[in-house]
Amino acid sequence: MLFLTLKCVYEFVNRRDVNRHKEMINFELKNISKWSSDLFHLIYPNTCLICENELPPSNKFICSFCHNDFNYTYFERYSEPTPLDQLFWGRVSVFSTYSYLYFEKTKSTQPILHALKYGDKPEIGIEMGKLIGEQVKQLSSFQGIDALVPVPIHPKKEFTRGYNQSEKLADGIAEILNLPVLSNYIERTKNSDSQTKKGRFKRWDNVENKFISKNTTNFKHIAIVDDVITTGATLEVIVRILQENNPELRISIISLALTK
Ligand SMILES: [Zn+2]
């Protein structure tokens, strides 16, 4: 009897110790997890790319305030030709065009483009691509596209940047439209000087020999994807080259931003 009583007391004390140990271990684990989460947040803060405010876990890259502040073109609502359609009038025959945002230096589009091009943030290209894809999906003029062709950047630039920003946009659009991305369909042949101080015609000369595409394609309708369109000179050359090799090919244009 005495033995049994002692055994019960021993087991009770032992179990209580085990439970206390378990609680202590859980407490330590919780603390470690909190510390590591704080540390992770310190190294990789989840902040909005534009206003740099902290993002809720459900948001990626851009907060809802900045989202509402986007400089939208609203081209999806146009029944008449858009300024982007008009940009190619008398230059090349383009089937359909779309740009998601207007680019103005003082507006919210600039930090997006900056982050995409120089901020080592390929993810933002994919995210913006998905947003563009959602819009293009609803446009009847973009139905029946067979493939997306990103505007290439020079291989040296791609090596330094680690990615081609237009290809990342195309990847995001492709995810929504379920299309192939033809990354090597057009090649860039030489690195051009900065084009910003040159006039439109000089720029055209400068751009003319930069691209080659000897490929013919069985696709009927492709969309070229660009990050930002200013004069349209680069796209004009690419469209010409593609149409020389494939006279029947329908070519459309999709860009993240159009300079206003
Ligand atoms: Zn923000």
Image (spheres, grey):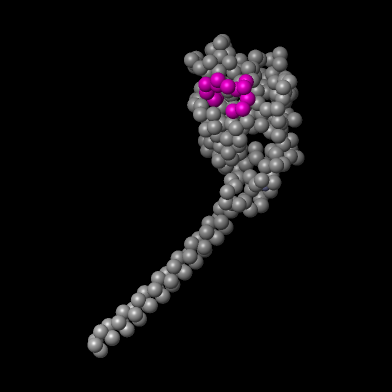
Task: Using the rendered view, name the quadrant where residue 136 is placed.
Answer: top right
Asked whether residue 142 is drawn in magenta, I would say yes
Residue 220 in percent (x, y) is at: 53, 15
Taking the image as drawn, is residue 250 in sight? Answer: yes
What's the residue at 66%, 52% (across, down)? 53
What's the residue at 60%, 47% (across, down)? 59
Q: In this view, does 192 lie above or below 243?
A: below
Q: Which of 161 and 3 is in front in this view?
A: 3
- What residue span does the magenta drawing correspond to? 137-149
Quadrant of the drawing holding the N terminus: bottom left
Residue 66 in percent (x, y) is at: 69, 44
What's the residue at 57%, 42% (across, down)? 121
Asked whether residue 245 is drawn in magenta, I would say no
Q: Which of 37 and 176 is in front in this view?
A: 176
Taking the image as drawn, is residue 235 in sight? Answer: no
Task: Using the rendered view, name the quadrant where residue 196 is placed.
Answer: top right
Residue 40 in percent (x, y) is at: 53, 56
Query: Position of 52 compared to 11: left or right?
Result: right
Q: Which residue extends farthest front?
A: 1
Query: Position of 70 compared to 124: left or right?
Result: right
Q: In this view, does 16 lie above or below 150?
A: below
Q: Is residue 131 above or below residue 233?
A: below
What's the residue at 67%, 42% (across, down)? 67
Residue 217 in percent (x, y) is at: 49, 16
